[in-house]
Image (cartoon, helix red, strand yellow):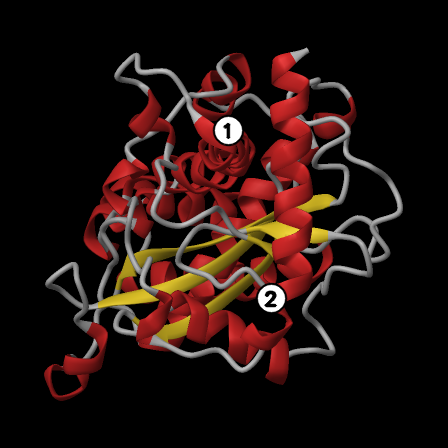
Amino acid sequence: MTSLEALAMFLWSCAHSETNRNVQNKFGKSGETVSRKFGEVLDSLCLLAKEIVRPPDYKFTEIPSKIKNDRRYWPHFEGCIGAIDGTHIPAIVPTKDQICYIGRKGYPTQNVMLVCNLDMLFTFVVVGWPGTAHDTRILSCVIEEMKSVFPHPPEGKYYLVDAGYPNMKGYLSPFKGERYHIPDFRDGSQVEGMHEVFNHAHSSLRNLIERTIGVWKKRWHILCDMRPFSLIKQQKIIVATTALHNFIRMYGLEDEEINKNDDNSEYMTGREEDININEDVGLYNPKRVQDGGYMNRVRNQIALALMENRNV
């Protein structure tokens, strides 16, 4: 079997969440060959992920064109370098281990933390956390335990996060208790007050990670209908598909979902069912909340500037 055919089998399997038997019938190979080649391609893509699922510049010296070329965000969000969000991927685990994986979805899932930049490229992915894990707990552990590999925001820079995360240095969250998500503003009512004006702008910019995750899941159906692989292989599949997402986007390959997204900045692919989850930070007390005063000042300054700009 050529490497090209092995890759084709892998892509077809992940894009359509096909069973081993269907792949055997499609490519005329034995079940053992299909399984072995799937594993070989999977390991190769995980190696590729180390090269392309990362920031192009770890110092984040360049201000993204998404910020500079949009008067809604410039210069208010000039320190933004990307966004962070969690998403749930179905997990196939032994019955005896299922309890910690069954969260709000009602079935076993992994809570996957994803970081993307403003070009909708994944720059970091964390897998292996059970579905009951809180988003803030995952981020806090990543900051403390993976500091050598996590792309930390440098001084003056920050990631956009939703209300499920604390407003701490390097991580800018919205004002809580106010309208925030894009669908909340679609009823035609006026955006009112400093907090809502900030939340609307923050949500409009941060929804790029909602769209990125939506496109990623839409392209790779196995992420919504996981096959009964070992848990470590399920985690590798998540990592491998982030590498494939980046490869498609970086090299301008034709992709229907990516094209739809590029044509419409508010294009959503059905991830809105994940909205408003894990928004009570009280469920988990992160160690770094004490440095939230700095980001509170940053948030207030941006909100005031947005209000002034709106009244001009």
112 and 141: which is toward the camera = 141
Q: Which corner quadrant of the image does residue 191 belong to?
A: top left
Is residue 78 rendered to the left or right of residue 10? right
Q: Position of residue 258 (x, y in %)?
A: 50, 25
Per the rendering, the mark at residue 308 is none
Q: Which residue is drawn at 53% across and 76% down?
A: 140
Is 217 above or below relative to 256?
below
Q: Residue furthest bottom?
A: 96
Q: Distance between the residues labelled 1 and 2?
A: 21 Å
The residue under label 1 is 197
Question: SS class of the residue under badge 2?
Answer: helix
Q: Which residue is drawn at 50% across and 41% down?
A: 209
**N-terminal of the two: label 1 or label 2?**
1
Is residue 218 rendered to the left or right of residue 144? left
Amino acid beneath label 1 = Val
Is residue 163 rendered to the left or right of residue 76? left
179 and 204: which is toward the camera = 179
Quick one: quadrant of the C terminus?
Answer: top right
68 and 7: which is toward the camera = 68
Q: Position of residue 113 (x, y in %)?
A: 47, 61
The residue under label 2 is 292
Q: Where is residue 217 in the image (x, y as percent from the top left)?
A: 37, 42
Question: SS class of the residue under badge 1?
Answer: helix
